[in-house]
Amino acid sequence: MSDDRGAPPGIHEVEVRGVRLRFAAAHMATIGDDLEPLHGHNYSVSCRVTGDLTADSWVIDFAVLKRLCRAACEELDHRFLLQARSALLDVREESGSWLVSYRGRAYRFPSEEVAALPIENTTAELIARWLWERVALALREGGHDGILRLAIEVEEMPGQSASYRGDLRR
């Protein structure tokens, strides 16, 4: 069986990575009932979409996909990534600062330097999911209805990455 262009059935995918799909950020994840020391990474992001071809044989323009993914990365760039829903940290915002405390350790971060993420932990896995949600929303709002699946991969350092994948048609 083939499609209306004579090609055998298959899946079309588009991927962008590298070029400005990066962000530098600080964080301190919780592991078990402990808190990592404050540290940072130069994260790299890749984004893959699976979908139907448009009438002019595109899944999506590479430039559009890069722009949407880059916009999400820019929200995190040069910020402290705060796990605002942490079960272990005492987190609150007051007087233009985020206050974070854990077992006698206390931190104060200027609000404008914090990306307060609605996640439980600042692991690469949950950062990938947060980015996925941002890009998925932008694809829906942009009318990219032919895209079926989205995958986001976040690399903390070479050889160390996590990803989140999901269907866009739910």
Image (spheres, rainbow, N blue to C red):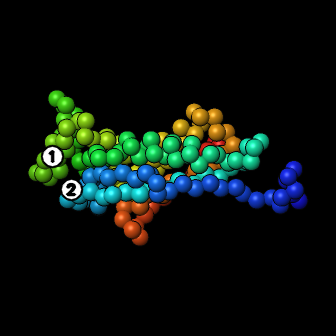
Q: Which residue is mark 2?
A: 38
Q: Is residue 55 above or below residue 41?
A: above
Q: How many angstroms separate mark 2 from mark 1 (CA)?
A: 10 Å
Q: Is residue 24 above or below residue 93?
A: below
Percent x, y for residue 57? 74, 48
Split into 4 quadrants, where in the image is the N terminus?
bottom right
Percent x, y for residue 108? 15, 42
Q: To which quarter of the image does residue 124 belong?
A: bottom left
Mark closest to the chain's N terminus, 2 or 1 = 2
Asked if disc 2 and disc 1 are in contact, CB closer than 8 Å, the reply is yes
The amino acid type found where label 2 is placed reads: Leu
Q: Secondary structure at mark 2?
A: loop
* Residue at (62% x, 54% y) in the render: 14
The amino acid type found where label 1 is placed reads: Tyr
* Residue at (59% x, 34% y) in the render: 142
Q: Is residue 160 above or below residue 83?
A: below
In front of the other: 28 or 46: 46
Q: Which mark is residue 107?
A: 1
Outermost residue on the bottom side: it is: 159
Task: Tell me if 2 is positioned left or right of 168 in this view.
Answer: right
Can see residue 11?
A: yes
* Residue at (40% x, 53% y) in the render: 22
